[in-house]
């Protein structure tokens, strides 16, 4: 990548003045892997045990799926922080908190329709909000933390939660996950600040040599899942938010991001870029969709796990794409964000 190109990337990260296509590719790939992982889970629950290769694939990408999404969100936080605090908070409320509320209610309604006996919580209870949207809840919290402690050195908000994750009891799984992912978010913010130095230290040529590191981490994660299952633990293994796995996962992400920054804007990646551009819509909509499809698969008597997985994954992506198309304009966009004009505009 030429110095001019690096400056262009740095400029875009600071001002959000254009799409950064390689970020859309990484974000879209991560979202598709999330959908595939969840599809694997619902097929195993509703249909039959999935072929081992799909369990391996889920564990293989475990070190990178959600951490990569966190890292990419952190890359953009500095540009957001240049706005006035009120406008910054409103942006996160209308584009993150609002869809959390909307889609939690959608998910709860779907659960009630599918099996009223399984409804355990009411909207005023904390357990009601403990859904698949934990990822967006975390991002919202990280953005607020970034605003509140904006004068604290970034390395502090990377090291402190990383260390704290080691002392959190295993039964506080959600808190440990929150602390595990927080350094990835602020690592993104750190790299944004020193993007040109990072791009110079890890050249594209060096990144191709170092790619063995993220591949080795992913292979170990996949094999660990196989070993744990072979030992009789049906929950499986893999590097799922284990605190000691954070450092190799971070190193792997830094290498993968450096390589991704060299990806040309080729036409065949357009569908992945589209998913990345509307990643929030795909994320919030996919879970109720594939859960409903899994329930339907069980009701109609589908017994072939491989067929069920392919069908459910494909239809989930297709329906989420329809949501993405509808969500680009009113009134469909109200499912995913509040109108920008609801915030009073500053007078010139």
Image (spheres, grey):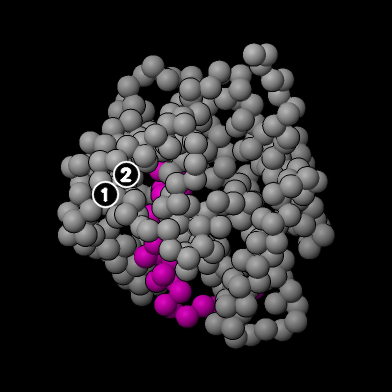
Say left or right for 182 vs 137: left
Residue 9, compared with residue 288, is above or below; it is: above
Can residue 7 be seen at all in this image of the molecule? yes
Q: CA distance from mark 1 to mark 2?
A: 6 Å
Where residue 10 sits in the image (x, y, percent)? 36, 36
**Residue 263 in picture, x, y percent from top left:** 36, 57
Residue at 54 percent of width and 64 percent of height:
271
**In this view of the protein, which residue sits in the foreground, 19 or 129?**
19
Please say whether residue 305 is visible from this viewpoint. Answer: no
- The answer to whether the residue labelled 1 contacts the one labelled 2, judged by CB atoms less than 8 Å apart, is yes
* Label 2 secondary element: helix
Residue 1: horizontal and vertical position, in percent?
A: 26, 49
Task: Please identify the dominant SS of the magenta region.
Answer: helix
In this rendering, the answer to whether 190 lies above or below 312 is: above
Looking at the picture, tell me which residue is in the foreground, 193 or 113: 193
**Residue holding disc 1:** 1
Secondary structure type for disc 1:
loop
List the residue tagged with mark 2. 5
**Residue 266 included in the magenta stretch of the image:** no
- Measuring 73% from the left and 35% from the top, which residue is drawn there? 339
The disc label shown at residue 238, or none: none
Residue 231 sits above or below residue 102 on the image: below
Q: Nearer the viewer, residue 317 or 139?
A: 317
Q: Which residue appears farthest toward the front when viewing the image?
A: 4
Q: Quadrant of the C terminus?
A: top right
Which residues are the magenta region?
45-71
How many numbered marks appear?
A: 2
Left or right relative to 33: residue 86: right
Q: Tell me where residue 92 sits by quadrant.
A: top right
Quarter where residue 224 is shown: bottom left
Image location of residue 147, percent across then percent down: 49, 22
**Residue 48 in magenta?**
yes
């Amino acid at each position: 990548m030429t110095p001019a190109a690096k400056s262009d990337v740095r400029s875009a990260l600071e001002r959000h003045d254009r799409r950064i296509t390689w970020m859309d590719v990484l974000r879209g790939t991560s979202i598709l892997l999330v959908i595939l992982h969840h599809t694997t889970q619902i097929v195993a629950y509703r249909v039959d045990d999935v072929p081992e290769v799909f369990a391996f694939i889920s564990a293989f990408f475990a070190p990178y799926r959600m951490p990569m999404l966190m890292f990419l969100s952190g890359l953009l936080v500095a540009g957001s922080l240049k706005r006035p605090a009120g406008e910054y908070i409103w942006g996160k409320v209308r584009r993150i908190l609002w869809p959390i509320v909307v889609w939690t209610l959608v998910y709860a309604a779907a659960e009630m329709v599918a099996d009223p006996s399984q409804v355990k919580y009411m909207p005023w209870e904390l357990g009601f909000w403990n859904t698949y949207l934990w990822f967006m809840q975390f991002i919202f919290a990280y953005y607020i933390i970034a605003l509140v402690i904006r004068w604290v050195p970034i390395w502090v908000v990377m090291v402190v939660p990383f260390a704290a994750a080691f002392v959190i009891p295993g039964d506080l799984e959600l808190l440990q996950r929150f602390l595990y992912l927080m350094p990835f978010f602020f690592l993104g913010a750190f790299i944004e600040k020193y993007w040109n130095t990072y791009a110079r230290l890890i050249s594209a040529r060096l990144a191709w040599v170092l790619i063995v590191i993220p591949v080795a981490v992913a292979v170990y994660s996949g094999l660990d899942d196989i070993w744990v299952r072979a030992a009789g633990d049906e929950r499986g293994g893999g590097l799922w938010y284990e605190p000691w796995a954070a450092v190799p996962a971070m190193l792997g992400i830094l290498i993968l991001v450096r390589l991704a920054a060299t990806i040309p804007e080729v036409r065949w990646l357009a569908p992945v870029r589209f998913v990345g551009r509307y990643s929030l819509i795909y994320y919030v909509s996919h879970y109720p969709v594939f859960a409903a499809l899994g329930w339907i698969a069980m009701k109609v008597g589908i017994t072939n796990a491989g067929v069920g997985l392919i069908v459910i994954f494909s239809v989930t992506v297709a329906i989420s794409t329809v949501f993405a198309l509808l969500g680009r304009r009113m009134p469909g966009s109200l499912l995913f964000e509040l109108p920008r004009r609801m915030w009073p505009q500053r007078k010139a």
